[in-house]
Image (cartoon, helix red, strand yellow):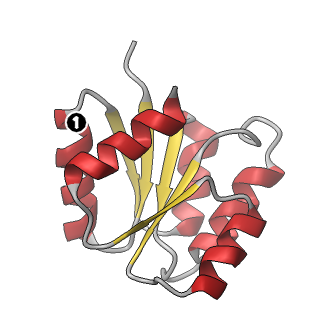
Amino acid sequence: MSKTVLTIDDSRTMRDMLLMALEDAGYVVIQAVDGVDGLETLAAQGADVIITDINMPRMDGFGVIEGVRADPNHRTTPVLVLTTESDAEKKARARAAGATGWIVKPFDPVKLVDAVRRVAA
């Protein structure tokens, strides 16, 4: 059965790129436009893996990670951070909040799919 990946990013272009890379690899992709939408979508539809941006309106990626980890149904759901940020302090903050991994934009579709496969196993 196909795994479902929830992508959360305020950039339509980035969502489209994620959709193409993940669907080509056989994943079911659901999308959200910001952190609030992401947590609502997760609650309504669930997901096996979450990929979130950090810098978004309404709720940033740190808020998403904290929200996911606070939900007993998704406490162990892998969360990959996909961002232009490469700051060590932000990486540490994301890890402390419960992020599973960190991918820097622009991403290589093959490496992205490999990362998703590793955490979705």
Q: Nearer the viewer, residue 85 or 55?
A: 85
Residue 43 rendering spot, x and y as whole percentages: 64, 42
Tell me the residue at 29%/50% (across/down): 111
Residue 15 rendering spot, x and y as whole percentages: 28, 60
Question: Left or right: where does residue 17 sit relative to residue 104?
Answer: left
Q: Nearer the viewer, residue 41 or 90?
A: 90
Tell me the residue at 71%/77% (across/down): 93
Q: Is residue 36 above or below residue 5?
A: below
Q: Nearer the viewer, residue 36 or 27?
A: 27
Tell me the residue at 42%/41% (across/down): 116
Q: Is residue 27 above or below residue 15?
A: above
Query: For numbered disc 1, what is the local secondary structure?
Result: helix
Residue 76 rendering spot, x and y as whole percentages: 72, 39
Q: Nearer the viewer, residue 59 or 101?
A: 101
Residue 88 rendering spot, x and y as whole percentages: 59, 84
Q: Quadrant of the N terminus?
A: top left
Q: Is residue 2 above or below residue 33?
A: above
Q: Is residue 115 above or below residue 99?
A: above
Q: How many neighbours does mark 1 have within 10 angstroms: few (below 14), some (14-19), or many (20 or more)?
A: some
Amino acid carrying mark 1 in the image: Glu
Which residue carries the number 1 mark? 23
Label tally? 1
Tell me the residue at 83%/39% (across/down): 72
Question: Left or right: where does residue 104 sit relative to residue 34?
Answer: left
